[in-house]
Structure formats: C-alpha cells, structure tokens
Amino acid sequence: MAQSSSGREAPLNIEYQHVALKKRYPLRISRGESAGSVNLFVTVSRDGVSGIGEGAPGGLTGADTAQACEDQIRDFLNTH
C-alpha cells in the first residue's frame, strides 16, 4: 500500500452517487409493480486506482433507500 511522506497509508477517497434507474419493462409481482429504483454507486479510490460497487435498496438488507445504504456503509467505515 502506498504511504504518504509521513509514513502513513494514503487515505481512501470514497464517493457516493445516487442514480435513478428506469427498468425497460416494469416488474410486476403480487406485491405490486416497480418501474425503477434509485441505486447507490460507491467509488473507492487510492493512488490512481479505483473500484466501483453498487447497492440496490431492498427490505431484505435493512436499507429501503439509497440513502439508507449509504448510511450503513458510512456507519461501518466509522467503526472499523
């Protein structure tokens, strides 16, 4: 891992982006219809190298919105 001039690791740069996605064909099930969602894209970068991840809100994850997904990630990073 890269280190700064002080001998510490270079910090991670983390960016969060909420993106509205529209389905080509609405999903219809017994609980209703969904024509789209707002998903969370997270970009993590350090020293010119980046990785991108996506979070799709859903009741099974305990995060019903993109903001709730982001909050869970921020809480995790603040405690680890």
Image: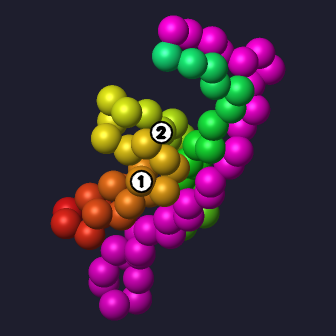
Identify whether 5 is placed above or below 17: below
Would you call the spot at circle 2 few (<14 residues within 10 Å), some (14-19), or many (20 or more)? many
Q: Residues within 10 Å of mark 1 (few under 14, many from 20)?
A: some
Q: Residue at x 75, y 32 (%)?
A: 22
Can residue 49 be seen at all in this image of the molecule?
Answer: no
Mark 1 and mark 2 residues within 8 Å of each other at the beta carbon: yes
**Residue 28 in magenta stretch:** yes
Residue 43 lies, in percent from the top left, at 56, 55
Please state which of residues 41 and 66 is positioned toward the viewer in this rendering.
Answer: 66
For disc 2, the marked residue is: 57
Relative height, residue 55 to residue 67 (above, below): above
Residue type at tag 1: Ala
Question: Disc 1 versus disc 2: distance between alpha carbons?
Answer: 8 Å
| Residue at x 71% of width, y 27% of height | 35
Judge by depth and name the residue closer to the eye, 78 or 13.
78
Question: Which residue is at the far bottom?
Answer: 6
**3 or 52: nearer the eye?**
52
Residue bearing the label numbered 1: 68
Which residue lies at the image location 43% right of the left edge and 34% below the top edge? 58
Magenta span contains residue 9: yes
State the extent of the magenta-drawn residues as a range. Answer: 1-30
Q: Secondary structure at mark 1?
A: helix
Q: Position of residue 66 (x, y in %)?
A: 51, 50
User: Earlier along the polypeptide chain: callout 1 or callout 2?
Assistant: 2
Residue 9 at what x, y percent from top left?
34, 74
Q: Is residue 54 visible?
A: yes
Answer with the quarter of the image where residue 63 lies.
Answer: top left
Q: Nearer the viewer, residue 45 or 65?
A: 65
Task: List x then y, in percent, for residue 80.
Answer: 20, 63
**Quadrant of residue 5 within the rendered picture:** bottom left
- Number of numbered callouts drawn: 2
Amino acid type, label 2: Pro
